[in-house]
Image: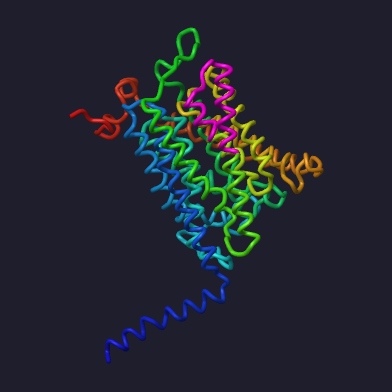
Amino acid sequence: MEEYIVDSLSIAPMIDSAEVITKSGINSLDTVWVLIAAMLVFFMQPGFALVEAGFTRSKNTANILMKNFVDFMSGSFLYWMIGFGIMYGAGSSLFGEIHLFDFSFFGDTNVPSEATLIFQTVFCATTATIVSGAMAERTKFSMYLLVSIIISVLIYPIEGHWSWGGGWMSEMGFHDFAGSTVVHACGGFLAFAGAIVLGPRIGKYTKNGNSAPIPGHNLTLGALGVFILWFGWFGFNPGSQLSATGDVNAIAISHVMCTTNMAGCMGGLAALILTWIVYGKPSLSLVCNGILAGLVGVTAGCDAISIGGAAIIGLVCGCAMVGSVALIDHVLHVDDPVGAVSVHGVCGVLGTLMTGLFARDGGLFYGGGWHMLGVQAIGALAVVCWAFGLGMLTFLILKKVHGIRVSPRVEEEGLDIYEHGETAYNSL
């Protein structure tokens, strides 16, 4: 009898909760879709880790892997603590609200607020991870941890509010479906600021100013990382539909998956052909970045453009990435070991602008006039200035107060031993 009473008491709240869920409009299929998409975007973290590790030297591999873990671990906690409220709180057109450890304010949607929180958390972690590649092989781990915290708490949530949280860019009509600007351009130009303040790696540039190649230690890892990122992008972009119920959403998800894939393919092909023509041989490392460039570029307008438009965006971004890598390295003498600035920063902006050209509803090439292109340009410029400006301020303050670069001895012998007391590769 007592057992029956306990069971009855434990079941009653469950029935009440089910009734509340039914009345609130939460949809089970939509929830499962958003959670699966969040898992796919989370799986991009090991993709980034492998790309960055493969494209840098073996003596810094443990450091690279550790930074990717830190981005997600600290980002998850801090975004839950304060970032989500800043990004999605009602607030003003510039800033959300402070909701410490509270996301329940984000209600009345088709999925539970917990599903929204985890989906947006993995996006926040992606932004922070982009920065680590450009700052690889010479950054103090403690200082990088601080940078990751500042991105998750302040830089990303505020500019994210402008577009996705109902802020001034959203009111203006800015279109960034899954984050070419909000995620990738923000991370890319933060990375640019970090690489400038840090300075180049020892031996990267000769006394005459010529760039000396510093090859990554394992292109196999790098290529595998790109395949994983490509796979994860099928959660990143289609998942941003945030619903899988009904014919309209089914068609939208299918369309976004096709445009996403096409842009990645054409970005890689563009890099392959261009490097073959310019350098005499097709470069695997640049083809890998070309694929990512196409994926980054299409992320803003993957829902609004045709598959043909996605192919053109991929081609343009693949070519632009190759040119940008050469410009940043050989002309500007900014050392970006993995090409993060070119892939995420340059191509994030380009893809956002080209949405204003190729969007089937409002794009310049579809009779929509210049309005949408102008809005896209203003939004992209605002985020670039915010990310680069606040990034420079952050890095310069840290450099002045504590220093953000390891000593020459640590850099030459590798960060793994000095920063972490272990190496990724140990001979038997």
Furthest residue in direction left, as rendered: 428
Using residue 379 as the reference point, say whether residue 422 is left or right of it: left
| Residue 179 placement: quadrant | top right
Q: Residue at x 61, y 36 (%)?
A: 384
| Foreground pick, 218 / 190 | 218
The stretch drawn in magenta includes residue 295: no
| Any part of residue 201 in sight | yes
| Residue 377 placement: quadrant | top right
Residue 203 in picture, x, y percent from top left: 40, 15
| Foreground pick, 216 / 66 | 216
Residue 149 in picture, x, y percent from top left: 44, 44
| Foreground pick, 416 / 282 | 282
Q: Main secondary structure of the magenta part?
A: helix
Residue 201 in picture, x, y percent from top left: 42, 21
| Any part of residue 185 in sight | no
Using residue 16 as the reference point, say whether residue 241 is left or right of it: right
Asked if 220 appears above or below 83 in the picture, the reply is above
| Foreground pick, 96 / 67 | 67
* The N terminus lies in quadrant: bottom left
Furthest residue in direction top, as rendered: 208
**Which region of the structure is painted magenta?**
263-291
Asked if 31 appears above or below 323 in the picture, the reply is below
The stretch drawn in magenta includes residue 273: yes
* The C terminus lies in quadrant: top left
Asked if 207 appears above or below 407 in the picture, the reply is above
Residue 128 in picture, x, y percent from top left: 47, 41
